[in-house]
Each structure stands twice: as C-alpha cells, then as structure tokens.
Amino acid sequence: MEWRWDFTWDILPRLIEATGNTLLAAGGGYAIAVVLGLVLALAQRTPYRVLTWVVREIVEFIRSTPLLLQIFFVFYVGPQFGIRLSPWASGMIAIGLHYACYLSEVYRGGIESVAKGQWEAATALNMTTMQTYRRIVIPQAIPPAVSGLGNYLVGIFKDTPMLSVIGVTELIHTANTIGSENFRFLEPYTMVGLIFLAISLPTAGLIRAFERYVRRKMGLQ
Amino acid sequence: MTFFEFLVQYWPRLLSGAGVTVVQFFLAAVLGIALSVTMGLMKLSPNRLVSGAAITYIEFFRGTSLLVQLYWIFFVLPLFGLTIDKFTAGYIAVGMNIGAYGAELVRGGILSVPRGQWEAALALNMTPAKRMWRIILPQALVNMLPPWGNLMIELLKGTALVSLISVADLMFEARQINSSTFLSAQVFGAALIIYYIMARFMLTPSMRWLERFMARKMGRA
C-alpha cells in the first residue's frame, strides 16, 4: 500500500480540529487532577486516622486499576442510577480522578521533602496550620514536584485516546471515523502518531527547561 | 440482581477473561524486559549508530500513546503485508511500549553502579561482556527493582487496551457482559476488583519478594 499525499492533505484539517479536542481533554483532565491531587495529598496528612486510611486505600485502588475500565465505569454506572453524564463529562471525571491519584503522590513527595525545621519555625511564629501550608510548606514543596507534575501532564495527554471508547471526538476517534469512511487507515493512524510525537516531545523539553528555571528562581542551584 | 447473584452467574466468563489478561501480561513482560535490557545497553553504547537506534525507539514509544501504537501495529502493518493476529499484536504493542520505559530504568540502574566496580572488573582482566554480566548488571538490577514494581503495574493496566482490538481479556469480557445485561455497576465493579487483586495482592508482593531475594543474594540484607 502506498502513502497518498493528496488524501493526507484532505484529512489534515479534520485531524487538526481533533487535536484541539485532545488538548482540551488533556487540559481539562489535568486541571481537575492538579486541584484534586492536592486535596488527596493533604487529606492523607490530617490527624484523623480513619480519613487518612480511607483516602490512602482509594488512591491505591485507583492507581492499580486500568484507566480504560474506570472510564467505562463512570460512563455506564451513572445511568443505572439515573445520572446521565455526557461522554465529555464522564471522560473528564475519570481521567481527572485517575491522575489526581498520581499527582497526590507527587505532592506528598514534595511536602515530605520540606525540612521539619520549617514547620517548627512556623509554629514558633504562631502561624495556623492553614497559614503554614499556604505560605511556608506548599511554596517549598512545589519545586521538587515540578518534574513529576510535568511528566504526568504529558502522561495525561497520551492517555486521552482512551476517551475515544465512549465517543469523545479526539484524535483517535477522528482517525477511526476517517479510516472507516475512506477504507484507508494508513494515513490517519500514522498522522495521529506523528501529531502525538510533535506535541509530546517538545512539551517534555519545555518541562525540563521550566524545572531548571523554577529551581534557579527558588535559589536551589 | 445483587452483586453476589451476579458473580455466581458470570464468574466463569470473568475468570476466563482474567486468564487471558494474565497470559497477555506475562508475554508482554517477557518482551518488555528483553527490549528494556537490550535498548538500555544500546543507549549506553559509545557507537553513535547503536545508541541512536535505541534513542529513536525509546523516544518514539514514549512520545506516542499505547493505543495509537496498538492500532498502528494491528491495522496498519497488515497493509504492508505483515499480518499479525490480534492476540500477538496485543502483547507486542504493550511489550514494546513498556520496553521503552524500562530501557530508561535499565540505563539509570547501570549508571548508578559505582565507577570503582567497573575499574575493579577491568583490573581483574574481565572481558566487557563478563564484566557487564557478572559485576554490573546484578548490582544495577538491585538498584532498579523498586521502580520496576511500578512499571509492572503499568504493564498490567496497559493490557486492558488489548480489549479494543477484540482480544478476549478481562476488560473485553466485562464490556461484553455489560452490553448484554446492562448491569454496569456489577460487571465493571467486579472487573475493577479483579484487576486490583491482581495488582495489589499478587504483583506487588511478588516484586517485594524479588527485591528482598536479590538484596539477600547480593549480601545487602
């Protein structure tokens, strides 16, 4: 089978449009994950043993089971109990929750890397726990977490094709449609692969540069 | 239908799906580990051509999605006359994907072996192959086992994607049962629990055991 350039040019606008959806899905999922991940990380540091244990087990459970299955679970279980979610909404919930669990581990590592003396100094200054977290601990916990946070941004982007199974019209979904309309799969699938490479490799480079920048800014190097 | 009644009726299908998942896991693991070691060593080669080939493989498979790779191997390769049945295509895609991540772990593990060990092996007049096999790799293995535990869980989760090319694994059976019964909460819930048991109570303890076993072998325990 030969590569057809004219066909490639014909389908390119549709693929570019789908790339927008893929980026939107990755961005939306990541936005949920960044916030919820911090909540999950902080919940594991409360003095309430039961809460800490329950959150820890939930995080472990979500991290050890396939995202694809979780996407199906969120999409199909809702309607059984009368809650109808659109493919986009259930996709964002599933992918956001899945990555929140990964990010909570990244935050946890960052928070644990803050020296104990910082906590003691904050206590000596009569700061409340909230103030200590917000003004002392979290700002110092972020720089060591930047590389992990960045890696999972690329990770979430690469996992968005799974949303195609519930009908989110991202890249793979569009490539499937184009392929079955024209009975040509070579160009759409190859182009999707190239688009993924063209986005994820430079992003990974940018994240490394940003990591160096943050470390310099914080005077860590 | 209660969850228990559901299990009584459908456990044979879930079990056969889980069996296929386990087989896919082991075949992909064998391929992935072989590729990791080969590509990890190749990336360290002073020969530009050899290390370049390894870098291309690693960046390509880490830069695109597993789902895209799977579809490409299953739908596009036959167009070039290389037809692979779905079962084989499944574990090849998952194994090649994991191999790219594993190669970086192998490389990091080898680089973490202290310089003196290389020099001592040289002083004992060992050939490069013997030095690598008897001195460097065993120590590298101990250093890199903990991240391999996480990678093996990623591998197990990755096998769920083979259901999308109709390999009858646990994910596939769950979807089939769901579309004929609409008992989404029961079937997807049961599948989640089975994946969790495999990851948390079978895979993780085995990796821990291997870590302890290797540490004892190396006289570090």
Image (tube, rainbow, N blue to C red):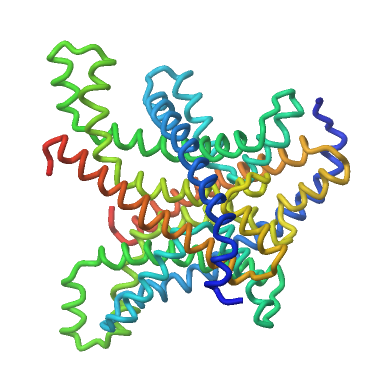
For the N terminus of chain A, the quadrant is: top right
Using the image as rendered, state which of residue A151 and residue B150 is in the foreground: B150
Number of disc labels: 0
Q: Quadrant of residue A106?
A: bottom left
- Percent coordinates x, y for residue A184 in the rendering: 83, 37
- Percent coordinates x, y for residue A45 in the rendering: 29, 76
Using the image as rendered, state which of residue B100 and residue B186 is in the foreground: B186
Using the image as rendered, state which of residue A4 and residue B74 is in the foreground: B74
Identify the residue at horizontal 54%, vertical 71% (top origin): A32
- Percent coordinates x, y for residue A128 in the rendering: 27, 88
Using the image as rendered, state which of residue A101 and residue B207 is in the foreground: B207
Residue A94 left/right relative to A126? right
Q: Quadrant of residue A147?
A: bottom left
Q: Quadrant of residue A38?
A: bottom left
Residue A205 left/right relative to B129? right
Identify the residue at horizontal 46%, vertical 49% (top origin): B154
Residue A28 left/right relative to B83? left
A89 w.r.t. B73: above or below: below
